[in-house]
Amino acid sequence: MSRWCAFLTPDAPEAHLRSVGGRPMAVTADCALGVVDGPGIAALFETDDRIAAVGEVTLFNADLLRARLGGDAPERGCPDGELLLCSYARFGPAGIAAADGMFALAIADGPDLVLIRDHVGTRTLFHTRAGNTWAASTSLRALRRWPALRTGLHLPAVRSFLTFAYLPGRETLLRGIHEVLPGRIVRLRADGTMTEETYWEPAEIDDPRSEAEHVLELRALLEDAVSRRLPSGGPAGVLLSGGVDSSLVTALAAKRHDHPVRSYSIGFGGTTPNELAYSGLVAAHCGTEHRVLTVPGETVAARLAETVALLDCPVGDPLTVPNLLLAEAVRADGIDVVLNGEGGDPVFGGPKNLPMLIFELTRDDPDPRARAAAYIDSYRKCHGDLPMLLTPATLAELAGADPVTDLVAPYLRQGQMTSLLNQLLHTNLRTKGAHHILTKVERLTAATGLEGRSPLFDRAVIDHSFRIPPRHKLSGVDEKWILKQAVRDLLPSTIVDRPKSGMRVPVQQWLSGPLRELGHDLLLGESARARGLFREDTIRAWLRGDGALLPRQGGKLWLVLSLELWLRSFGVAP
């Protein structure tokens, strides 16, 4: 299991690679490509004309790329990364745009280092510069170990994390290290300059066809997206929550796969509301071998620090440990590919869109930033609490930082998307989709040797979504209308027509039970006090549950606790 690093420097690039624990795989006069320890699978790829690349590449349309290359295509059976590299060498950015898959690639292209991240952002990619040397990696931890880099905590990213529960753009929690955005090609040059090119971005297209015609095309695209992500042999796994998104993926997998399909659900025991009755109904309807994993709070407490350490950015999602445990259970059953239903909300219009549409109809503030502020408020994380949560010294340091609304405002303006609903979907896709949902799935599944695949984030499915008139995606108050119509014949009406409820995670119970001691020790301990980010009186009040008539402290404490664990894991000094 490994991830990769690449260095571009006139000064012994191989030595820089070794300094982060890397093993050289290709070395030129100015560039070194290699692997480092960590979750993931990295490999070296080369073309006949000696262009070399290192990356993690899984393609779902290899046959199409091979046909485009014709006689220039490498031999059948070659690694996916070699095929993608050949497509880039022949067609440039258009060769990458034609691909469909999960990839993060660094190419030694003459005197430059070229970084490529897949269309939707399934696999992450970071870059930084120290002295006269560029470094890039899929592992933030590897860059953190680079002796030449003098980095530390990036306070604006702390504010962003507390606002969104993830980091929605280029910034990371480590100063001077930046993330490559999805659908982008970044060229790093020896003179210290860099350029960025967008090779794919969803676009709103006016397609006046009837709802029935859109339904038929969407159904065909969904079947194709699921089919191309199924393993070529052996059983397939599906993570099944019982909602319409994971249920439709389960139904299509059972319909299209010629081997057994096994479905997996999570429960928390006790009296916590759950969707296990719905997931059981879908499993019985589709004929899958079904397994329910019960996750007690004691296990969450025992595995939390380890799980947070697997992530390049902490995720304020209390399902992280259950997600890891579920991946381990799937892998223990001998399965190496698992599908999920992630993507239905950001691509077809799930929660948060109705409140935003209502806000737009009723707002009296003409300030164009008001829409971005309302979008941030809809997250209901810690943004409104920052004045009372952060210490005066921290607030003073943040006083000159760009407003956090800048991270989402570009997607919420008239531009590529003219309808408000499509602007919201574009925002969700490019922020939460790329920087929370997909990356969390990839990191936690890869850590177990499993590959998680998300058919609803398929590029062709996304492109079609932005051709569908908004009235077919949000019909009155019925969200994801067109998606439901496309799969209505596959699932019981109980599943298709039920409102989205989401999984209820007993965070408050965990924090007042098995996580109580750990939370107190970490958030009020010497290290947290020395770091000086948070006001102790606010943390103590939240730990006591003051004002718990609206029990939001649990979710907020989870954010702060996840951040503190991540900072300790990455050795970010107080």
Image (spheres, helix red, strand yellow):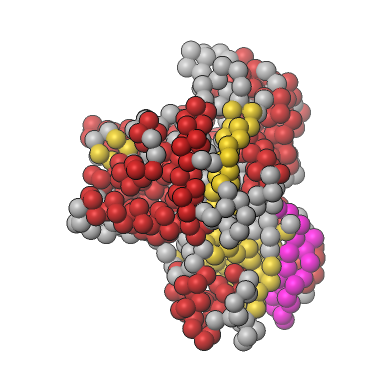
Q: Which residues are magenta?
A: 21-39
Residue 252 pos. (x, y %): 45, 49
Q: Main secondary structure of the magenta part?
A: strand
Does residue 29 show up magenta in the picture? yes
The residue nearer to you, when weighing 416 against 255, is 255
Q: Is residue 353 magenta?
A: no
- Based on the displayed image, in which of its 4 quarters is residue 125 positioned? bottom right
Q: Quadrant of the N terminus?
A: bottom right
What residue is rendered at 40% in x and 53% in y? Answer: 222
> In what quadrant of the picture does the C terminus appear?
top right
How many marks can you see?
A: 0
Residue 410 in sight here: no
Task: Look at 65% across and 17% down and name the residue there.
Answer: 512
Q: Nearer the viewer, residue 348 or 139?
A: 348
Q: Is residue 101 visible?
A: yes
Q: Answer above or below: position of 432 versus 492.
A: below
- Identified at 30% across, 44% down, the residue is 485
Question: Would you identify the image quadrant in which residue 320 lies?
Answer: top right
Q: In this rendering, would 418 be left or right of 325?
A: left
Direction from residue 131 to residue 278 in the image, left or right: left
